[in-house]
Amino acid sequence: MMTNGGQRLLPLALLLLLSLGVVACATLSRPLYFTLDMSTPPGEGAGYTALEQRQVSVDTIRVTDKLVRRDILIRIGETEVEFYQDTKWVARPSDLVAEKLAAEFMPPPKSAGDAPPVLLLHGDLLAFEQVDAADGSVYAHIRLKARLRTKGRGRHEAVHERLHEFREPVAADSPMPKAVVEKLSHGLEVIAAEIARDANHIPLD
């Protein structure tokens, strides 16, 4: 027969086990956070190296409503989307894209007297997502409307506007969403180079 002392210890032991279970569940349910590859050294970015006698400075990147949240978006149909439940961006997509593009256009350190004219970049981020196609294939997809203007012009006085789109497959056996995030980083490098080539043809007053 259990003594009174043992009866008192039993509820305490159960309470301790329940507490440990709650802590373990909380630990296991912590989300993973992803960011874009910001490691490009100044002067070596895809955007900067494609420029000719000018610079591009990122001013603003706006997003559509579906990209306001930090959850990584998955498009599973023309009218249907979902989000990873346990995986998030470390910051808002608009901030990450602005930082990544800024890194791709970052010039090397030099004196102010050597600085070429600057074009300001405004962007509307319309898609930044994983696409799960009906045939089972997976894509990384970016759609960015870029507007370039010279300093001294208003934000709505763009001298060049273009819709850039990047869509590339991701190997089906790759770890998700890590592989998609890496492909999205690469996609922004491709778009930065396209923006730079457009900028080269803009007359500078």
Image (cartoon, grey):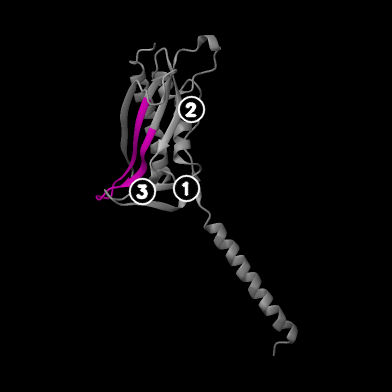
- Whether residue 27 sits left or right of residue 77 in the image: it is right
The residue most toward the left is 135
Q: CA distance from mark 1 to mark 2?
A: 23 Å
Q: Which residue is mark 2?
A: 40
| Residue 138 falls within the magenta-colored stretch | yes
| Location of residue 204 by image quarter | top left
Where is residue 8 shown, x and y percent of the image?
71, 81
Q: Which residue is mark 3?
A: 74
Image point (54%, 17%), residue name:
109
The residue most toward the right is 5
Where is residue 17 shown, x and y percent of the image?
62, 70
Please report the bounds of the magenta region as a residue range: 124-147
- Disc 1 or 2, which lies upstream in sequence? 2
Vertical order, 178 against 110 (above or below)? below
- Disc 3 or 1, which lies upstream in sequence? 3
Prevailing secondary structure of the magenta residues: strand
Residue 192 visible at all: yes
Query: What amino acid is found at the position of numbered circle 1 in the picture?
Result: Lys
Q: CA distance from mark 3 to mark 1?
A: 12 Å
Vertical order, 38 against 8 (above or below)? above
Vertical order, 173 against 157 (above or below)? below
**Number of residues whose C-alpha sits closer than 10 Å to that of mark 2, classed few (under 14), some (14–19) or many (20 or more):** some
Give the quarter of the figure containing the C terminus: top left
Q: Which residue is mark 1?
A: 88
Where is residue 74 shown, x and y percent of the image?
36, 48
| Location of residue 170 by image quarter | top left
